[in-house]
Amino acid sequence: MKYTVEYMDIWYGSVEDKPGGLADKLSPLAVAGVTLEFLDASRGSGMLFVAPVKGVGQTRATRRAGLQKATMMRALRITGPDVPGLGAHLCQVLGESGISFRALAAAVVGKECSLCFAFDSTEDARKAKRVFRKALPH
């Protein structure tokens, strides 16, 4: 089984909690050709997290939409075949390695899964990447 483990820059900003508030933020990104692989927004929280943003044009559009690159966290995305218990296993090996994470978002489409772990520092993300590579099914 083949898995990829890659760093991902997260962009964030506030969203007005009103009809069309999220669309107001996402429309400029769509016009700039941003293909979001990660989006997290919740009603009432007023926060939006998106990734990836690539290139100068997409970066400009994202900034114009009021979003900024998150410097307070570093994310890792794991993609590959879905296996029952994979998320639990990865959380367990992080804990056993003494690595804390601040957030986890996961999804399965068909037979493929994607897990996005957010860490408080680049160093924690580096350690986690090494742990994940050893712990993932081969």
Image (cartoon, rainbow, N blue to C red):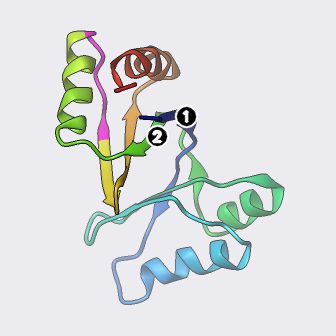
Of the pair 113 and 35, the residue shown nearer to us? 113
Of the pair 26 and 95, the residue shown nearer to us? 95
Would you say residue 43 is visible in this rendering?
A: yes
Quadrant location of residue 30?
A: bottom right
Of the pair 85 and 138, the residue shown nearer to us? 138
Q: Name the residue under label 2.
A: 77
Indicate the secondary structure of the residue bearing disc 1: strand
**Callout 2 environment at 10 Å: few (<14), some (14 to 19), or many (20+)?**
many
For image coordinates 36% across by 90% down, the residue present is 19
- Residue 111: image x %, image y %? 34, 56
What amino acid does circle 2 point to? Arg
Tell me whether the residue at label 2 lies in contact with that at label 1, contact meaning CB atoms closer than 8 angstroms.
yes
Q: Mark 1 points at which residue?
A: 6
Q: Quadrant of the N terminus?
A: top left
Would you say residue 71 is visible in this rendering?
A: no
Quadrant location of residue 59?
A: bottom right
- Cα–Cα span, label 2 and label 1: 5 Å
The answer to whether 130 appears left or right of 64 in the picture is left
The answer to whether 30 appears left or right of 85 in the picture is right
Mark 2 / mark 1, whichever is N-terminal: 1
Q: In which quarter of the image is the C terminus?
A: top left
| Image vertical order of residue 99 relative to residue 29, above or below | above
**Callout 1 environment at 10 Å: few (<14), some (14 to 19), or many (20+)?**
few
For image coordinates 39% across by 15% down, the residue present is 134
| Residue 57 drawn in magenta | no
What amino acid does circle 1 point to? Glu
For image coordinates 29% across by 66% down, the residue present is 42
Task: Write down the region rendered in magenta.
Answer: 97-103
| Image vertical order of residue 111 relative to residue 77, above or below | below
